[in-house]
Every structure is written in C-alpha cells, then in structure tokens.
Image (tube, coloured by chain):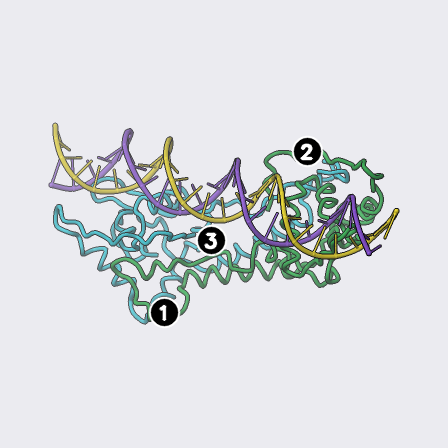
Chain colours: A green, B cyan, C purple, D yellow
DNA sequence: TCAAACTCGGACATGATGAATCCGAGTTAA
DNA sequence: TTAACTCGGATTCATCATGTCCGAGTTTGA
C-alpha cells in the first residue's frame, strides 16, 4: 500500500524504518512478493521495490497467497483409511466430506479477500484519518534522505511483535 | 460424527482405536469438545463421551471453534502506531483497514462452516460410500468388546500424521 | 573505464506454538 | 468395599514461523 504512493523504487530498509519493524525480516517477505510477481525489484545504488501492476489490480488475496503460499489451510490426513474400519484406497479418490466442507470455507475466505484491492485499502485509510496519509508518506519517502554518513535511525522495535 | 451413531457413551480409547490415532492425543481434543459443551463426559466403569445435542444442532463451526478457540485467526499488531509516521493512539480506536478486511474474510469462513451440521456430514459419507457406514461403525462400537484381558490392539499409527 | 557503495537474494539460528504424552483425581459397577 | 476403568490437567518434544546474517549482482559517480 505504501508503494502505491511512491514514484521511485523504495528500498526494504526504508520501508522497515517507516513501519518500525526489523529491516531484514521485512526484506524476507518482500522477496516473497517479488517471487509472486507483485513487486519488481531493481538493484543498484538507488534501487528498491516497485509495484508491477496498478493497485486496482492487486487484491488482498494476491498478497496473502504470496506470503502464506497458495495451498489451502486445511490438509486431510486420510484417517478414513486407517484403523479397523479403514476404507479401501480405491474408494478414496475423492476428498472426504469433512475435507469438502473445509475447502468450501477456505474458498469463501479467499473470495472475500479477492473482493478488496490495494487501491481500496488506500482509500479506506484516507477516509479513516480524514487526511491524505499516503501523500504524507510519499513526502516522507522522498524527503528525509539523510546527508551522507548520517542516517536516521529508527527506534528499536518493541520485542514480541508477533505479526501475520 | 461417530458419536452420532453411538447409543451408549464411547470412551476416548475406543474412538482412537477406530481411527488408528494416538489415544492420549485424541483425549486432549475431546476434552476441548467437553469444555465447549458439545459432548458430555460420563465417568466410571462404562463411561465415555456422549453428544449433548442432536447432530442437526451441531455445526462444523462449533467443532472448529471448540478446538481452535473462538478468537479470530488474524491479530493486528498496530504497526500504524510505530515508526516516524506513527498515528496517535486516540486516532486508533477503530481497527485499521487491513484488519477490517481480514476480519470480514474470517467471518465469511465461519459463515461457511456454520452452514453444515454434523448430521449433514453423516449423510454425506453415507452417500459417498453408498453404504450405511455409520451403522457399521455403530456395530463395531457395540461389538468387538474383547473378553476380559484380551483387548484388540490397533496397528501403530504411522509417524508424521500431521493433522488439523 | 573503474571502483565503490548500495541493492536484493538465499542460507542460517532462535523462540513460540501446536503435537504427542504421561500420571493423578474421580466415578461407577460389581 | 474394592477394584477397575473413566476423564482431567500438567508435562515433554517436534515443527513452523520469527528474526538474522553474509554473499552475488547492479548501478552510479568519478
């Protein structure tokens, strides 16, 4: 969402400073977004990350699947094929009833995430704070380029910042 | 679902034998179902677990929330309140846009699970295998009561049965 | 042309959560 | 009264997510 406001490549370290989180860890997830072709990484001295598509064409589901993986959250262990009443393997070609239920719920979850785009999220925050927050962020990204040698240091991230 | 077919209390060990899984571990989750008031535990010599409600009134969501907990799967870490562009706490009374999106998806997931009952699942399996599977299971539960001392031993559960 | 500095990328420790287990308290049936 | 069998909570272990590090590659400026 921040990259929406940026006009030039933004380094991972800059994003981490903005959010007050670990730079190396944020980089890890940005790599996932890069693998998923959501952002394009440009290397070199003034490199960073850029969106590959307009924010209207990036859904929340795209982001979640990029970092969590596209595989469904429920995996069946086929206990129906175990124990004294085990069903024969040839009768277990299709997923079981419980699996079908979980898969259906999973689809509903993904469908809901597919409905909202990054652009939608940007508009939502603007409405929440009744100010052009993304514009201010864009300013901060452009400015605050510390002169050579002196780099603005972000405060230490609070321990135990369990994120998702 | 198995308890649907049973007419008498079923011990956790018996259920574990039927499914070919660890008895002690299955017991742990049955305790969760007991805490959630989905099953009632009767102690003593011929004790076990019994459903507290007719299977039509138990949804898949009830079971999932009983074992996973009712709290939403997404927790916000409030990174908007951190870093140089941190939003003031008084502006953060309501959940942020991303959190709202995740919560909405979570609701959709739970709604899908709420639509299917344990009774539905039982009918589904009967249809899947074109046989009264639950009836056969009920028979196995009633019979196969090994004479004193000799207890039918289930095969060792395959290692790495990662379940959900 | 060259060199230096800055970028991303994948490989490496650590901590927390879930998986699997054990033994004790309580109850029932004989 | 006793004895056996049940569930219940406290404990240990493995796995995954979290957090970190250093090397390969590229661009920019001199």
What is the number of the mark on residue A156? 2
Residue at image mark 1: B128
x 57%, y 54%: residue: A68
Q: What element carries label 2?
A: loop
Residue at image mark 3: B61
Contact flag, marks 1 and 2 (Cβ < 8 Å):
no
Do circles 1 and 2 both sit on a common chain?
A: no
x 85%, y 44%: residue: A143
Horizontal arrangement in the rendering, residue B90 relative to residue D30 (left or right): left
Q: How far apart are marks 2 and 3 (CA)?
A: 41 Å
Q: Is mark 3 on a helix, strand or loop?
A: helix
The chain that hosts pointer 1 is B
x 76%, y 50%: residue: A10
Q: Which of B49 and B74 is in front in this view?
A: B74
The chain that hosts pointer 2 is A
Percent from the top left, x then y, of residue B3?
A: 31, 54
Query: Looking at the image, can residue A138 be seen?
Result: yes
x 57%, y 53%: residue: B106
Label 1: how many residues lie within 10 Å, few (<14), some (14-19) or many (20+)? some
């Amino acid at each position: 969402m921040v990259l929406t406001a940026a006009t030039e490549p933004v380094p991972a370290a800059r994003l981490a400073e903005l959010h007050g989180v670990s730079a190396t860890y944020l980089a890890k997830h940005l790599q996932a977004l890069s693998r998923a072709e959501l952002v394009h990484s440009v290397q070199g001295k003034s490199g960073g990350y850029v969106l590959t598509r307009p924010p209207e064409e990036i859904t929340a589901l795209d982001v979640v699947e990029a970092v969590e993986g596209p595989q469904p959250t429920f995996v069946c262990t086929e206990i129906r094929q175990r124990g004294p009443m085990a069903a024969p393997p040839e009768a277990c070609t299709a997923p079981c009833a419980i699996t079908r239920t979980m898969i259906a719920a999973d689809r509903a979850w993904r469908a809901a995430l597919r409905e909202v785009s990054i652009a939608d999220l940007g508009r939502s925050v603007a409405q929440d704070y009744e100010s052009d927050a993304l514009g201010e962020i864009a300013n901060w990204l452009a400015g605050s380029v510390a002169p050579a040698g002196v780099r603005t240091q972000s405060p230490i991230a609070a321990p135990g910042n369990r994120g998702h």
